[in-house]
């Protein structure tokens, strides 16, 4: 039985971006406090911040610049604008988060599981409303839309490569916990972001 596709209203897209970015920023703060690593361009930005001591937000924004053209060419203007907005907001929120939360101590395993889940839910909210956090998210969505591979599978493969690189920067136990978080994140995306189940479009 065929069901009609319901289109998201602009205010629904805006709210989803705000909620998705907020959840992701909180998850990344957990990761940063516990010195763990996430995947995709956010993980690359975290890795650079650990090595250099620079703030995650500006690094994350700059790392994503090369991917805007792919987003524009392959996914369209609306997707690119939503992605740019989400990336800019996440960069700003991640800089503000330490002031909003204050000094915190988070147990590393909790940070991996809950932080990874928060980021996964944030990415899911953006995916459902035709947005992303740039970088590998754009490539993953593009390949899924063309039925080449599931977005979660693509991200998981790239995350593994990033974790291997992290072994040269972080202690092995931190990398192991980061893998746990990556599994939690990607499980949420793989289970819930399935076009045949969710028919809403922006």
Image (spheres, grey):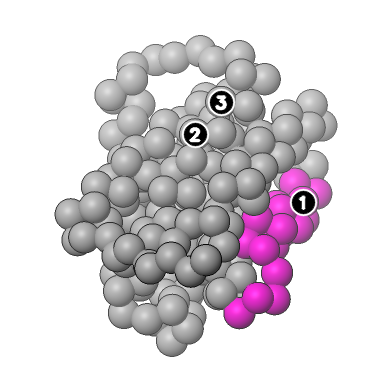
**Mark 1 or mark 2: whose residue is earlier in sequence:** 2
Q: Classify mark 2: helix, strand or loop.
A: helix
Q: Nearer the viewer, mark 3 or mark 1?
A: 3
Magenta residues (range): 146-165
Q: Is residue 181 above or below residue 87?
A: above
Residue under label 1? 160
Q: Which numbered dot is residue 17?
A: none
Would you say residue 148 sits in the magenta stretch?
yes
Residue at image x 67%, y 20%? 109
Q: Which numbered dot is residue 118?
A: 2
Q: CA distance from mark 3 to mark 1?
A: 19 Å
Q: Main secondary structure of the magenta part?
A: helix
- Residue 167 falls left or right of residue 189: right
Q: CA distance from mark 2 to mark 3?
A: 6 Å
Q: Is residue 76 above or below residue 201?
A: below
Residue under label 3? 114
- Residue 40 % position (x, y): 60, 55
Residue at image x 56%, y 33%? 117
User: Which quadrant, please, contains the C terminus?
Assistant: bottom left
């Amino acid at each position: 039985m065929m069901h009609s596709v319901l289109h998201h209203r602009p205010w629904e897209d805006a709210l989803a971006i705000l909620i998705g970015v907020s959840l992701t920023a909180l998850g990344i703060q957990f990761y940063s406090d516990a010195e763990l690593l996430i995947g995709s361009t956010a993980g690359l930005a975290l890795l650079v911040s650990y090595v250099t001591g620079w703030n995650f937000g500006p690094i994350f924004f700059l790392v994503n610049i090369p991917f805007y053209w792919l987003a524009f060419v392959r996914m369209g203007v609306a997707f690119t604008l939503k992605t740019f907005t989400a990336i800019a907001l996440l960069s700003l929120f991640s800089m503000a988060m330490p002031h909003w939360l204050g000094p915190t101590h988070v147990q590393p395993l909790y940070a991996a599981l809950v932080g990874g889940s928060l980021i996964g839910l944030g990415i899911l909210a953006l995916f459902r409303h035709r947005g992303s956090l740039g970088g590998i998210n754009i490539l993953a969505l593009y390949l899924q839309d063309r039925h080449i591979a599931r977005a979660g599978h693509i991200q998981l493969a790239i995350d593994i490569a990033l974790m291997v690189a992290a072994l040269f920067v972080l202690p092995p136990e931190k990398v192991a916990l980061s893998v746990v978080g990556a599994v939690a994140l990607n499980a949420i995306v793989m289970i819930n972001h399935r076009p045949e189940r969710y028919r809403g479009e922006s």
